[in-house]
C-alpha cells in the first residue's frame, strides 16, 4: 500500500498537473439533440462551458424502414435542417463555431451513430441530456445514453433531465460556466481513478476538489478503522500536493455503499460536478448496468463527467 501511495504522490509531484493546466476537454464538443425542450435548455448550458470553442450539433432522424416515400423523408430532413439552423444561430450569437450533422436511422440504433460521429469528427468530448430515473429498475439513462456511456472513446458529460428542467438563473451560473467550481472526485486509488483526479486538476476554472474514498468492506470494527485511517492518509497526501498546485482539495473518507456515499457527499457539499473514470481497479472496474459508476451516473441529481482516454486500453478487453 505504501508503494502505491508513493507512486501516486510522485505522479502529482512530477509536474504532470502543471504541464496540463491549459488542457481543454471541451474544445470540440459533440452535442446530440432531439430538439426537445430539455435538449434545448441543455444546449444553453453547453454554450457556457469553460474552454468551449466548437460545437458539432447532431440529429439522428429516425425514418420508418418501410412505407414512406422519398418526398416524405425529404420533408422530415428539411424540418431537421431548419431546427438545426435555429440552434446554430443561437450558438453563433454566443461566439462559438458550429457545425451541423444530420444522420438517418431506420433501425433505431441511434447510440452507435452518436459514437461513430464522435470518432469521425474527432471531438474532444460528448455532452448529452439524459432523461430522469426510469420506472423500470436497472435501466440506465435510456438506451441511447447507455450505449454512449459504455462505448464512447472520449469524455462524456451527462446533464440530467430533471436538473435541466429545474435550471434557475442561480443554478445556471453554478452548473454551467462555473461547472468546475466544486468537483467531487471519487477514487479507489487505481491508476485510472488517479488519472481522472490529475486531469480534473488540470482543467481551467477549477475552484476546489473533493477527494472521496469509500471503505466498503471490513469484518470487524478494528479492521474498518484501520482501512479508514489508511485511506485518510492516502487522500491527505494527494490533497496536500494538489493544494500546493494552487487548488484547494479536501479529503473525505466514508464507510458504506460506494454510490450512496458519493451521492450523499455531492449533495451535502453542493458540488457542481461529479467526475469519475469509466475504468478502475475496484469500484469502477466496469461501467456496466449495476456497477458503481453506472449507479452514480444513473442516480446523480447533478452533472456527471465520465472521463476516459481513447489511448488507454480498456481492461475489459
Image: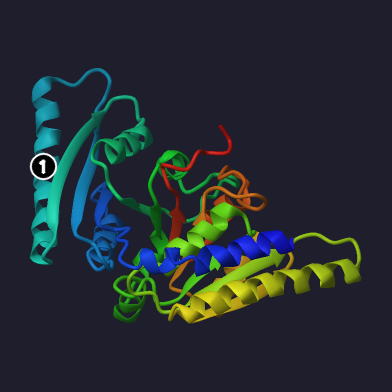
Q: Residue at x 67, y 59 (%)?
A: 4
Residue 270 drawn at (x, y percent): 49, 78
Residue 167 drawn at (x, y percent): 34, 72
Corner quadrant of residue 10: bottom right
Q: Can residue 281 be seen?
A: yes
Residue beneath label 1, please?
81
Residue, far front: 14
Q: Residue at x 50, y 38 (%)?
A: 313
Number of numbered discs: 1
Disc 1 element: helix
> Is 18 located above or below residue 82 in the figure?
below
> Is 24 located above or below residue 62 in the figure?
below
Side of 82 relative to 164 (left or right): left
Corner quadrant of residue 138: top right
Residue 163 or 55: which is nearer the viewer? 55
Residue 158 drawn at (x, y percent): 40, 56
Residue 176 or 218: which is nearer the viewer? 218
**Quarter of the C terminus within the rendering:** top right
Q: Residue at x 41, y 79 (%)?
A: 207
Q: Can residue 270 be seen?
A: no
Corner quadrant of residue 172: bottom left
Residue 87 drawn at (x, y percent): 14, 55
Side of 105 relative to 246 (left or right): left
Side of 272 relative to 298 (left or right): left
Residue 1 or 84: which is nearer the viewer? 1
Amino acid at each position: 500500500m505504501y508503494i502505491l501511495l508513493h507512486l501516486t504522490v510522485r505522479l502529482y509531484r512530477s509536474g504532470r498537473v502543471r504541464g496540463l493546466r491549459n488542457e481543454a476537454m471541451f474544445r470540440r464538443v459533440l452535442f446530440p439533440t432531439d430538439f426537445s425542450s430539455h435538449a434545448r435548455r441543455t444546449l444553453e448550458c453547453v454554450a457556457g462551458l469553460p474552454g468551449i470553442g466548437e460545437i458539432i450539433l447532431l440529429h439522428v432522424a429516425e425514418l420508418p424502414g418501410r412505407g414512406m416515400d422519398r418526398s416524405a423523408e425529404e420533408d422530415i430532413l428539411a424540418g431537421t435542417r431548419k431546427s438545426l439552423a435555429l440552434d446554430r444561430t443561437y450558438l453563433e450569437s454566443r461566439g462559438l463555431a458550429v457545425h451541423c450533422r444530420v444522420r438517418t436511422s431506420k433501425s433505431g440504433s441511434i447510440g452507435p451513430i452518436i459514437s461513430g460521429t464522435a470518432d469521425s469528427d474527432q471531438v474532444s468530448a460528448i455532452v448529452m441530456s439524459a432523461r430522469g430515473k426510469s420506472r423500470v429498475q436497472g435501466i440506465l439513462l435510456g438506451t441511447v445514453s447507455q450505449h454512449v456511456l459504455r462505448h464512447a472513446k472520449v469524455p462524456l458529460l451527462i446533464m440530467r433531465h430533471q436538473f435541466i428542467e429545474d435550471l434557475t438563473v442561480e443554478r445556471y451560473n453554478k452548473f454551467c460556466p462555473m461547472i468546475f467550481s466544486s468537483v467531487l472526485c471519487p477514487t479507489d486509488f487505481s491508476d485510472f481513478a488517479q488519472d481522472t483526479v490529475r486531469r480534473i486538476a488540470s482543467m481551467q476554472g477549477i475552484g476546489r476538489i473533493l477527494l472521496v474514498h469509500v471503505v466498503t468492506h471490513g469484518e470487524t470494527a478494528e479492521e474498518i478503522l484501520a482501512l479508514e485511517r489508511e485511506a485518510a492518509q492516502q487522500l491527505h497526501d494527494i490533497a496536500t500536493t494538489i493544494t500546493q498546485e494552487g487548488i484547494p482539495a479536501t479529503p473525505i473518507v466514508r464507510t458504506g455503499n460506494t454510490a450512496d456515499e458519493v451521492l450523499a457527499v455531492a449533495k451535502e457539499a453542493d458540488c457542481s460536478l461529479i467526475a469519475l473514470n469509466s475504468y478502475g481497479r475496484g469500484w469502477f472496474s466496469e461501467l456496466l448496468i449495476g456497477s458503481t459508476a453506472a449507479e452514480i451516473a444513473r442516480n446523480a441529481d447533478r452533472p456527471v463527467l465520465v472521463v476516459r482516454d481513447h489511448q488507454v486500453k480498456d481492461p475489459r478487453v
